[in-house]
């Protein structure tokens, strides 16, 4: 009678007999089409991208053919279209192709955008224009993401293992899902007037803490910096300071301001004929001209007035003491 193996020995034997699982899905095998109906996505691109896309389109076509996806570039309508074919084995390939043309339309270089077809790489296009109302303030905060000579953007890319492109009113990011969440948080906080350098410092501390296995199941809040505003809150000062003195109550509304006709009626000008009005206006004009002539004559005469000759001040002699 064969001897029954012990519990530990049985587990080891089962583990040795089980063949290792394949890590990657191979498309070389003839699995047939995985899609029943054709699916397609299209996106528009700006006119200035037309020349670049025309040059890089063979590279994009070659990359999509490996996944069994057909692509079309329409230069007349300015659109890119991707669709499934009978060779499409992976149903999720059309979603990666959709992200690819979306990144190409957002000015991401073709060699970088093709990496979206790799396993574990995702993308996120963050719209930042509607987060800030003022245009000048938006430009200033968008520049903070880049930093001087692109140093802030480079540090963010290294810490999050992502590719980030700031272009126009959007920020395009490529990388793992976990890192894209961090990038979105940094960008949205930057638009909310929180400088990215604070998040960069926090990410650097988290990277160092992740190396310590003892802190894997502990909270890291005590290690992370807590940035607070150091400026003291100022008392609100109104723009228009109104007179707060108590005014006497009157039941009648304030008198309306006098119009131009009312003022003419008070002075009697309203009842004069047109000729009389012209004569009065001409007389007033001549009086003003005389005043101007007198002022100019005084200014000319002031140039010929000799300056006062300042002699040496006389020294006061001290009185001799008696």
Image (cartoon, helix red, strand yellow):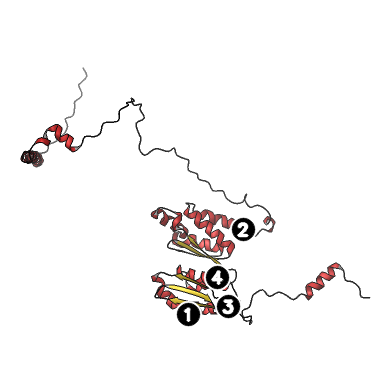
Residue under the point 59% across and 71% down: 119
Q: What's the CA distance linking mark 2 and mark 1?
A: 43 Å
Q: Which residue is mark 4?
A: 95
Q: What's the CA distance linking mark 4 and mark 1?
A: 20 Å
Q: Residue 208 bears which disc, if any?
A: 2
Q: What's the CA distance linking mark 2 and mark 4?
A: 35 Å
Task: Tell which circle, 3 or 4, labels the residue nearer the N-terminal end.
Answer: 3
Can residue 96 be seen in this snapshot? yes
Between label 2 and label 1, give the one nearer the viewer. 1
Task: Tell which circle, 3 or 1, labels the residue nearer the N-terminal end.
Answer: 1
Q: Picture coordinates of residue 23 (x, y %)?
A: 67, 73
Q: Nearer the viewer, residue 302 or 57?
A: 57
Between label 4 and label 1, give the one nearer the viewer. 4
Between label 3 and label 1, give the one nearer the viewer. 3
Q: Nearer the viewer, residue 81 or 243?
A: 81
Q: Secondary structure at mark 1?
A: helix
Q: Is residue 17 left or right of residue 183?
A: right
Residue under the point 44% across and 72% down: 79
Q: Which residue is mark 1?
A: 58
Q: Secondary structure at mark 3?
A: loop
Task: Tell which circle, 2 or 4, labels the residue nearer the N-terminal end.
Answer: 4
Q: What's the CA distance linking mark 3 and mark 1?
A: 19 Å
Task: Tell which circle, 4 or 1, labels the residue nearer the N-terminal end.
Answer: 1
Residue under the point 87% across and 69% down: 6
Q: Which residue is mark 3?
A: 88
Q: What's the CA distance linking mark 3 and mark 4?
A: 12 Å
In the rendered image, the quadrant that contains the C terminus is: top left
**As displayed, is residue 322 above or below residue 101?**
above
Quarter of the image where one finds residue 273: top left
Q: Are marks 2 and 1 in contact (CB under 8 Å)?
A: no
């Amino acid at each position: 009678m064969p001897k029954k193996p012990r519990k530990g020995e049985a587990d080891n034997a089962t583990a040795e007999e089980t063949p290792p699982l394949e890590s990657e899905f191979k498309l070389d095998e003839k699995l047939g089409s995985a899609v029943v109906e054709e699916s397609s996505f299209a996106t528009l691109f700006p006119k200035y991208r037309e020349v670049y896309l025309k040059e890089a389109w063979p590279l994009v076509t070659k990359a999509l053919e490996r996944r069994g996806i057909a692509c079309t570039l329409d230069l007349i309508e300015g659109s890119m279209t991707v669709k499934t074919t009978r060779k499409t084995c992976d149903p999720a390939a059309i979603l990666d192709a959709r992200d690819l043309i979306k990144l190409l339309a957002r000015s991401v270089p073709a060699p970088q955008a093709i990496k979206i077809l790799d396993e574990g790489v995702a993308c996120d296009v963050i719209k930042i224009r509607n987060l800030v109302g003022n245009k000048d303030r938006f430009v200033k905060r968008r520049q903070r993401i880049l930093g001087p000579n692109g140093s802030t953007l480079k540090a963010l890319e290294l810490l999050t293992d992502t590719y980030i492109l700031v272009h126009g009113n959007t920020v395009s990011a490529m990388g793992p899902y976990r890192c894209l969440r961090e990038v979105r948080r940094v960008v949205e906080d930057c638009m909310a007037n929180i400088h990215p350098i604070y998040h960069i410092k926090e990410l650097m501390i988290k990277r160092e803490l992740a190396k310590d296995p003892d802190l894997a199941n502990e909270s890291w809040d005590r290690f992370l910096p807590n940035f607070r505003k150091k400026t003291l809150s100022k008392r609100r000062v109104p723009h228009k300071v109104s007179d707060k003195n108590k005014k006497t109550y009157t039941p009648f509304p304030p008198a309306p301001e006098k119009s131009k006709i009312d003022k003419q009626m008070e002075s009697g000008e309203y009842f004069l004929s047109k000729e009389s009005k012209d004569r009065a206006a001409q007389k007033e004009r001549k009086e003003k001209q005389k005043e101007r002539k007198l002022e100019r004559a005084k200014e000319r005469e002031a140039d010929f007035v000799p300056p006062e000759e300042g002699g040496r001040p006389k020294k006061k002699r001290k009185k001799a003491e008696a």
